[in-house]
Image (cartoon, grey):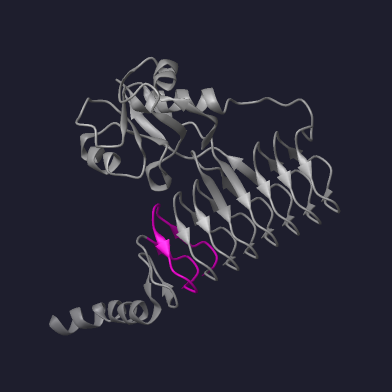
Amino acid sequence: MKFPNVYPLKEVAAIIGCEYVGDDDFPVHGMNEIHVVEPGDIVFVDHPKYYDKALQSAATIVLINKEVVCPDGKALLISDDPFRDFNFLTRHFRPFQSSNVTISATAQIGEGTVIQPNTFVGNNVEIGKNCLIHSNVSIYDNTIIGDNVIIHAGTVLGGDAFYYKKRPEGFDQLISGGRVVIKDNVGLGALCTIDKGVTGDTTIGEGTKIDNQVHIGHDTVIGKKCLIAAQTGIAGCVIIEDEVTLWGQAGTTSGITIGTKAVIQAQSGVSKSLEGGKVYFGSPAEEVREKLKQMAHIKRIPEILEKLK
């Protein structure tokens, strides 16, 4: 998430009321999660296990809960609770904007696009040309939709990330300030839910077609011309490369990559990254031929036990 302007480190530190290490005028361009940070971004870290990863990341400002040696060319924001202060910055730079109209006056809607009744279009939404958006779709603030997109009834674009920190009093939500980006020629079925990024974009690539009741988690990036069948669940921060097929009720864990032209058969559970160009089945998902051999061997266990008796 980029800020509307470049801010000096001193000013950002004042917003959250914390100490800092670095020049007063050290430039701060935005804030992001560690997997998408760029120079000029703030990244937060609140556990010693991840200090080195954050300090050595592309981020040039580290919001951290302990004063440590600052790497050359970087700056530190020293906070007693980086998670809380990261949320504070999100609220400060991208506050929630309520709406009292069905289609926001700040929304941009392209020529030839049809929006059916009872659809909500939020603030700063951009919708391209020749789209068809059916009734009861909810398009949250800052969503970007390309040309020739079809979205069926009941789909929600831009819900919050499922991202929480456990505290003694309960779960504390990481505030989502990112976007959903839908590229050209995408088709979304009914009752799909696509969460916005925490600070970056959840992206659906050009020409991808998604069936009914599919969930896609925050910051996931889906490539071009993928097919995703009904009731599939894709966790956050997943990369699905081009021309991947996921059949019905498949599911993934977070933070993995599925390679180009992979096929995930129905009801499979993907627990680790998978190479492209292969067919996978089962939970955990493995190459289909190997998985079927294993299942055949398992079926023989009663026979083998009987022989051993």
Q: Would you say residue 295 sits in the magenta stretch? A: no
Q: Residue furthest bottom?
A: 307
Quarter of the image where one finds residue 26: top left
Q: Name the residue located 83 percent from the left edge and 47 percent from the top edge.
A: 116
Query: Which range of residues does the magenta coloring cover?
Result: 245-270
Front residue (pair 231, 39) = 39
Q: Is residue 254 above or below residue 62?
A: below
| Above or below 227: residue 58 | above
Residue 191, position as x, y percentages in the image: 66, 50
Residue sitting at 39 percent across and 71 percent down? 275
Is residue 258 rendered magenta in the image? yes
Q: List x then y, in percent, for residue 176.
A: 51, 35
Residue 107: percent from left, percent from top: 75, 38
The C terminus lies in which quarter of the figure?
bottom left
Which residue is located at x 35 percent, y 65 percent? 284
Q: Residue at x 60, y 46 (%)?
A: 180
Which quadrant would residue 38 be assigned to in this image? top left
Q: How many marks?
A: 0
Residue 290, how many percent across, how many down?
33, 80
Magenta stretch: helix, strand or loop mostly: loop
Q: Quick check: 191 above or below 7? A: below
Residue furthest left as drawn: 309
User: Is residue 259 rendered to the left or right of residue 108?
Assistant: left
Q: Quadrant of residue 56?
A: top left
132 or 305: nearer the eye? 132
